[in-house]
Image (cartoon, grey):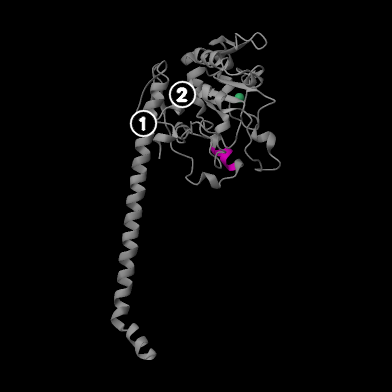
Amino acid sequence: MQFVHLSVEIQPHHFARLPCRHFLFVLIVALCSAAHTFAQAQHENIAMDKCLQSLVRSYPEVLASATRDSLYWKNGVVMPLGTMTIPQQKHLLTTSEWETILDGASLRDQLAECYPVGDSIKAPSRNSDPGRVRYEPFFRQMYGATEEAVRQRLVPVRWLAHLPEAEKILMVTSVNGVNEKLQAVSDELEQLPPEYRQYLVKPGGTFKWRTIAGTVRQSNHSFAAAIDIDVPLSNYWRNDMTKEDRFSYKNRIPLPIVRIFEKHGFIWGGRWYHYDTMHFEYRPELLTSECGCGGRP
Ligand SMILES: [Zn+2]
């Protein structure tokens, strides 16, 4: 009986039909995959368009409009968005490979990653650095291309003005009203319970024309739109690295401090895989629903 059964299984006409079925199956899978990829790309394009419009709305003083390919400034400058250079599999890159991509990031890259604003602090996934990807010409155009140009727009902020033991004058840019935003942050931080003051009373600094440690890229402090709070109670990935690419997320900055900064348009370096928990910088576009993780694929 066993022999008879086998002879049925290998009838010649089955040889002819099997490859055909196999081909159809492969074709259907390929079509479904292509349709999914197309839909995904469309979804990402729409999300990028919305984020771009949000970028324009976030800097009404200097930005006029945007198309899918260019950003138009009110002073007549047209800035290309460039191509996306961040690979989909960026989590497979070493820090060194990732840094090379950041060195040549386009404006499109700058908007590619959503910022995870929210009422929790989580260790970011590998190479997730939303806001750390910057197209430097954008910031030079926005705040000043040279140290002197940035310096001309500096104005004072009275940091923790109502706490006599902490009051300090910090110099930040007046472009985009960053000084007013930081003053609002300071006024609100003062209302926190006394145990939070240790993170705030000795800020590390605001304006300094310099490159980011270990890179050729200009720090956002160069543009006077960033602040470092207390350095000794902060963590920085380079300082925690035991050997090449070996470090793990650490943070001591309490969430209520982070949320006050975020409320006024400042993103936090503690939400980066390459964390810098003392660092906040003015990037209001990343805190909108269009560029935040809630509205992105
Ligand atoms: Zn900083």
Residue highlighted by disc 2: 284
**158 versus 71 height, above or below:** above
Check mark 1 vs ligand 1: CB closer than 8 Å? yes or no. no
**Mark 1, residues whose alpha carbon is within 10 Å: few (<14), some, or many (≥20)?**
some
Q: Is residue 195 left or right of residue 120?
A: right
- Callout 2 touching callout 1 (CB < 8 Å): no
**183 versus 256 height, above or below:** above
> Where does residue 109 sit, x and y in percent of width and height?
47, 35
- Viewer-side residue, 67 vs 175: 175
> Where does residue 196 sit, x and y in percent of width and height?
62, 21
For residue 50, the mark is 1
Q: Residue at x 52, y 44 (%)?
A: 90
| For marks 2 and 1 on the same chain, the one whose residue lies earlier in the sequence | 1
**Mark 2, residues whose alpha carbon is within 10 Å: few (<14), some, or many (≥20)?**
some
Rendered image quadrant of residue 271? top right
Which residue in the rendered view is the most extreme toward the front? 193
Amino acid type, label 2: Pro
Quadrant in which the N terminus is drawn = bottom left
Quadrant in which the C terminus is drawn = top left
**16 versus 125 height, above or below:** below
Q: Main secondary structure of the magenta part?
A: helix
Magenta residues span: 97-101
Amino acid type, label 1: Lys
> Where does residue 70 sit, x and y in percent of width and height?
38, 29
- At mark 1, the secondary structure is helix
Q: Ligand 1 is found in which quarter of the picture?
A: top right
Is 114 contained in the magenta span?
no
For the residues labelled 2 and 1, the Cα–Cα distance comes to: 14 Å
For residue 17, the mark is none
- At mark 2, the secondary structure is helix
- Viewer-side residue, 167 vs 113: 167
Is 98 contained in the magenta span?
yes
